[in-house]
């Protein structure tokens, strides 16, 4: 394959951000692809997902789509 996913190697960490309900299915599919290539995954989300597939999951509160990036930044500063 070509593109960014082709750069994924074993043990690299991929961060997935899922705050738009319309993109969850596509994002999960892409994350599953990088997992099959040996990547570790960290997901930051406000969606109801099956977190068992991912190594780390950070849940943030549900809010307006435009405010979600601010909550992600604040959550990362808190950690």
Image (spheres, grey):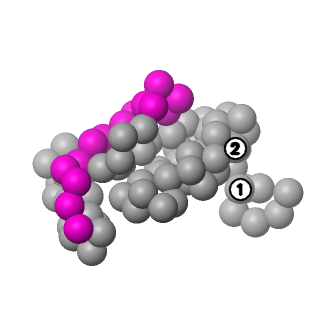
Residue 63 falls inside the magenta stretch: yes
Residue 21 lies in quadrant: bottom left
Which range is magenta? 50-64
Q: Which residue lies furthest to the front in this view?
A: 22
Q: Mark 2 points at which residue?
A: 33
Q: Which residue lies furthest to the top in this view?
A: 52
Tag of residue 71: none
- Residue 17 in view of the camera: no
Could you say which is closer to the camera, residue 34 or residue 51?
A: 51
Residue 6 falls inside the magenta stretch: no
Mark found first going from the N terminus, 2 or 1? 1
Q: The residue tagged with tag 1: helix, strand or loop?
A: helix
* Residue found 51% across the figure and 60% down from its top: 23
User: Label 1 neighbourhood size at 10 Å, few (<14), some (14-19), many (20+)?
Assistant: few
Residue 31 lies in quadrant: top right
Mark 2 or 1, closer to the camera: 2
Q: The residue tagged with tag 2: helix, strand or loop?
A: helix
* Residue found 19% across the figure and 43% down from its top: 79
Q: Where is residue 41 in the image (x, y as percent from the top left)?
A: 51, 39
* 10 on left or right of 22: right
User: Label 2 neighbourhood size at 10 Å, few (<14), some (14-19), many (20+)?
Assistant: some
Q: Position of residue 69 (x, y in %)?
A: 28, 67
- Residue 7 in view of the camera: yes
Q: Mark 1 points at which residue?
A: 5
Quick check: marks 2 and 1 in contact, CB under 8 Å? yes
Q: Where is residue 67 in the image (x, y as percent from the top left)?
A: 21, 70
Q: Which residue lies furthest to the right in this view?
A: 1
* Residue found 42% across the figure and 44% down from its top: 43
- Mark-to-mark CA distance, 2 and 1: 8 Å
Residue 5 lies in quadrant: bottom right
Relative vertical location of residue 25 with respect to residue 38 in this rendering, above or below: below
* Residue found 85% across the figure and 57% down from its top: 1
């Amino acid at each position: 394959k070509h593109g960014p996913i082709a750069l994924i190697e074993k043990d690299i960490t991929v961060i997935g951000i899922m705050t738009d309900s319309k993109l969850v299915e596509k994002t999960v599919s892409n994350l599953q692809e990088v997992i099959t290539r040996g990547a570790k995954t960290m997901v930051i989300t406000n969606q109801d997902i099956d977190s068992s597939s991912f190594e780390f999951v950070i849940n943030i509160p549900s809010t307006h789509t435009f405010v979600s990036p601010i909550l992600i930044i604040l959550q990362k500063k808190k950690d």
